[in-house]
Amino acid sequence: MNLRKNELVRVAESHKKGLSRYMVYRLQAAGKLERVSRGVYRPVSEDDFDAHPDIIGVISKKPDAVLCLVSALDWYGITTQIPFRVSIAVRRGCYLPADMPDAQIYRFSDISLKEGVRIVYIDRRRVKITTPEKTIADCFKFRNRLGMETVLEALRLYRQQMEFKPGELMKYAKVCRVANAIRPYLEMIQ
């Protein structure tokens, strides 16, 4: 088995790595591979600590997805909520695998999906995530699904714990078309 540490093996693509699907299952049964999510495995290492298996599992199934909303708030530490599902943003009309039970999926327009996105590495995996300012704007956009308490708490914690950039916040609020909704709250906390 010529797999690097933390290299993911998808059963559907295992033949590219010289493994049959049955070999993948035998390696898992022998304790050499561990299941990350359905159809996705990785080599077991005693010194490896996987702090975000849920995020890695979802991103491995949909690599072009963007971590957003409550998951992004949790990543930046500007919420007290513990996300029970991984929040991801995908392009409207895109294909999604049928077996993504750990994901809360939000459909974004092309412009909203490209603006305010940065790259972070989670467990040595490249993951797209919205910036803190874009995350706050997205929270206002989806305030009816998230609840206003969550949105206002995120705005308050962002103001207290991070560098406050109202110009950036309003830029992304215009992209998300929530500038009029967010303006009174920004005026109140400034």
Image (cartoon, rainbow, N blue to C red):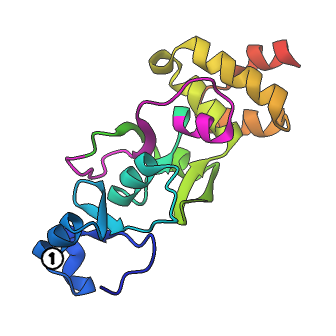
Quarter of image, res 29: bottom left
Q: Residue at x 58, y 40 (%)?
A: 72
Q: Residue at x 37, y 81 (%)?
A: 3
Which residue occupies 43% across, 39% down? 86
Q: Report whether residue 181 is seen.
A: no
- Percent x, y for residue 26? 15, 71
Q: Position of residue 81 (x, y in %)?
A: 56, 24
Span colored in magenta: 71-99
Viewer-closest of 159 and 138: 159
Dot 1: few (<14), some (14–19), or many (≥20) neighbours within 10 Å? some
Quarter of the image with the N terminus is: bottom left
Is residue 57 placed above or below 175 in the rendered structure? below
Residue 38 figure quarter: bottom left
Work out which residue is located at the far left of the displayed protein and give it. Answer: 22
Q: Secondary structure at mark 1?
A: helix
Using residue 17 as the reference point, say whether residue 121 is left or right of it: right
Q: Quadrant of the C terminus?
A: top right
Amino acid found under the numbered disc labelled 1: Met
Tell me the residue that label 1 is attached to.
23
Q: Relative to 51, is 125 above or below?
A: below
